[in-house]
Image: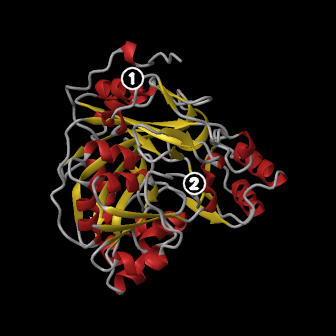
Amino acid sequence: MKILFVSNDLIAGHLSLLLHREGHDVHLFIEEKSARENFNNLVPKTNNWRQDLSWVGTDGLIIFDDVGYGAIQDKLREEGYTVFGGSELGEKLETDREFGQQIFKVSGLQIAELKNFFDIKSAISFIRKNPKRWVLKHNNHSFKSLTYTGHMDTGEDVVNVLESYNRNGLLKMNEITLQEYVDGIEMGVGRFFNGYDWVGPIEVNFEHTRLFPGDIGPVTSEMGTLAWYDNDEKNKLFTETLAKLKPFLVKANFRGDISVNCIVNQKGAFPLEATARLGSPIVHLQSEINSSPWGDLLFAVASGQKFNLKWKKGYGVVVTVALPPFPYNYKLDKNSSYNTDIHFSRKVTQTDLKHIHFEEVALRGAKEVQSQYYISDRRGYAMYVTGFGSTISQARQKAYKLLLNIKIPQMFYRHDIGAKFVKHDYLKLVKWGYLKHISKFVFSDQDSIIPIKR
């Protein structure tokens, strides 16, 4: 099948390589000019995706892996093309947080107070008039490192952060969002939607967004995720949140992957935000859990068809492998690891490559296993490593064992992905009804921190 893969900055770029490995005729387009060296000698590319529309035709598949292309997708579908990604109305759930919360509310979800601002001074004035704990966010996933969770009931620390951003010229021309702080456990739920109905099982996920182990440090795009699939349509988090959005998704003709990140506690689930696109790094974990070919799944979703997605029962872990200047890539790219070779302590095999997912990687040479991989960008999003097992412990061990084989100067990653869930969150979620008791949550104290030997 001919596949035209359109990406802004490769948020799910490795998927284009997987489709290429499946035997599809793939053309990859990268919108961000500074990222266009990535995947050189790995995936065939095009410099103008619009000129390739006649090549892919109405029999092929067009994939968009990011928001910002919704109106284009709607138009392409009207012209007869088969398109996976989202829609203009659907992606507004993510790109306009205030709109998203309004849709959550009218759909029957309980929400926390949220308000958008177009300048810092207005946001500061609002906090002073409404003193409480606030979370500072933005309507752009590229600015995750500027997210701040307030700790003071007066909101004064959030005011101080905003004043600092203002003095340093940050967030100019960017919309600011303030959301009321809700205490609880962060938990996500996702699923594919084909414009009419759900496709495949429910995805349950736990993001790890803080930079350092123990959930310390600045917020990043994400340092890793724990996830699994559930085929119980009565899953509590699903029925309280994502399931209620079905009428809206039908109205929006949304055809892609949709997830809602929530804070859950004894009072229920409070949706924080929607991801109306392929998420990263969860898309790489989906590659671990799915048994069906990606091409078949994405084509079915894009064409509004039912699809019997084959998947594995168990638990998956994905770990982000980062490099300087991550997560502050927008100012410090002179300190990047661009053009650094990637080494392995033993020869990389085809089996290894099934669990290593690239983002800022290219190949010096034409043959994937025999040639030299290198860091081909300056942002610091190097790659992602996944592990899957019948227990969380097995999944973690597989991922971290493979990570110890990867040698990149200055690489870093969190060694505790999945640990907090088993040690602290699991029993609370069972008590609140969001999880059932699962006998196979085997996880020892010795597992909580895996020594990193370089």
Residue at x 27%, y 40% (from the top left corner): 433
In the foreground, 260 or 91 = 91
Residue located farthest toward the top when viewing the structure as drawn: 446
Q: Position of residue 118 (x, y in %)?
A: 70, 67
Residue at x 31%, y 29% (from the top left corner): 395
Q: Quadrant of the N terminus?
A: bottom left
Give the residue number, with chain letter if any, for mark 1.
401
- The disc label shown at residue 37, or none: 2
Quick check: 308 above or below 388? below
Q: Is residue 223 visible?
A: no
Q: Secondary structure at mark 2?
A: loop
- Judged left or right of residue 140, residue 87 is left
Quick check: 136 above or below 438? below
Counting residues from the start of the chain, the first of labels 2 and 1 encountered is 2
- Judged left or right of residue 108, residue 137 is right
Q: Secondary structure at mark 1?
A: helix
Q: Amino acid at mark 2?
A: Glu
- Judged left or right of residue 69, residue 428 is left
In the foreground, 294 or 138 = 294
Residue 229 is drawn in which quadrant?
top left
Q: Amino acid at mark 1?
A: Lys
Q: Position of residue 310 (x, y in %)?
A: 17, 50
Q: Classify mark 1: residues with Cα within 10 Å, few (<14), some (14-19) or many (20+).
A: few
Q: CA distance from mark 2 to mark 1?
A: 29 Å
- The disc label shown at residue 127, or none: none
